[in-house]
Amino acid sequence: MIDPADLEHCRAVIRTGSLSFHAASKLLPASVRDPALALYAFCRLADDEVDEGDNEARAVIELQERLDLAYAGRPRNAPEDRAFAAVIEMFDMPQALPQALLEGLAWDAMERQYETIADLRNYCARVASAVGAMMCVLMRVRDADALARACDLGVAMQLTNIARDVGEDARMGRIYLPLEWLRDAGIEQEAFLPNPQASPEIREMVRALLRDARGLYVRSEAGIAALPTGARTGIFAARYIYAAIGTAVARNGFDSINHRGHTSKAQKLALIGKSALRTCGSTVLPKSPILYAPPVDEVRFLIDAVATNAPRANDWGQGRTGSLLSVMAELKARENTSSRSSGVAAE
């Protein structure tokens, strides 16, 4: 069980650091809400350490160490770590899921860019679909088809975030738009980043991201019937609220350079009401054939790590561990080089 004091700390962290998730968590049954708060507090800690720290590479390396300690049953003496270790034990959380999230954070620390939309979906799978798969574990859902639809929702939500934040990311020196799209449009990122413009070509790229997201939002709904009844309203709400952000971007003419799409409090409340109606409309939501659609290739490794009714690739563990180890080795090499350079400069 999660220690009540640790859980209260996690609740306070989410209350002050993520108002949207704190509000959404109230829509979940207590059996899911409390471990979700612990899980999200640890994920939020990881995200903040990388985004706000002075040394992103060092932050990711330390997070890997904290993750390993939690899975060894010896969490660091911090509320988030202890609560997360309790969640691991209570739900048999596959280590591959938080490792995937960590890999996505490592990619951010390395300022990785993405050549194609498939490469971008690989990033979305790690930083968003991995969290969706972890939420399924908390709901005791390990069906491969339901997991596939949860991963659809994660990719859709992250694509929406990227579409909304093109201007904000550019002003911070980051670009998530596929590089081949920029080349095809004749846009040089060296010119775009310091002075982003909402050109017709950039707006079309934002439109394309949201078009991909919209299809995935529709597919994600089919998996909600496989979730516990008490959790469906919260998941519907996440689906509708994030999709509404995309609609707001569209209303701005797909200009996410000069405008930031958002939903108002009144809109959120209306969408939560819509979500409750969808849930209460039928005690058991009818299954849709879309439930059985194959997952996008980029999220298959997450499903294989969790599902109890899908065959695992024989080499999954070795290949995925090798991938993470390769990324961490590169980060550590950069960190060591940076440390030596700082020492020389000091001398």
Image (tube, rainbow, N blue to C red):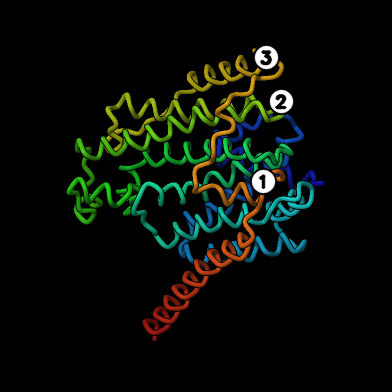
Calculate the distance from the C-alpha at mark 1 to the C-alpha at mark 3. 29 Å
Figure check: 325 above or below 262: below
Identity, as a three-letter code, of the amino acid under mark 2: Gly
Label 1–label 3 contact, CB within 8 A? no
Neighbours of disc 2 within 10 Å: few (<14), some (14-19), many (20+):
some
Sequence-first disc among 1 and 3 = 3
Neighbours of disc 3 within 10 Å: few (<14), some (14-19), many (20+):
few
Give the percent coordinates (x, y) of residue 236: 58, 26
| Image quadrant assignment for residue 276 | top right
Which secondary structure, mark 3?
A: loop
Q: Which residue is mark 2?
A: 230
| Quarter of the image where the C terminus is located | bottom left
Foreground tag (1 vs 3): 1
Sequence-first disc among 3 and 2 = 2
Give the percent coordinates (x, y) of residue 289: 57, 26
Identity, as a three-letter code, of the amino acid under mark 3: Ser
Neighbours of disc 1 within 10 Å: few (<14), some (14-19), many (20+):
some
Sequence-first disc among 2 and 1 = 2
Residue 310, label in figure = 1
Give the percent coordinates (x, y) of residue 253: 27, 27
Which secondary structure, mark 1?
A: loop
Q: Is residue 347 left or right of residue 181?
A: right
At 22% across and 51% down in the image, what residue appears? 183
Q: Is residue 90 left or right of residue 145?
A: right
Which secondary structure, mark 2?
A: helix
Q: Which residue is mark 3?
A: 282
Foreground tag (2 vs 1): 1
Give the percent coordinates (x, y) of residue 301: 57, 52
Identity, as a three-letter code, of the amino acid under mark 1: Ala
At 28% across and 51% down in the image, what residue appears? 180
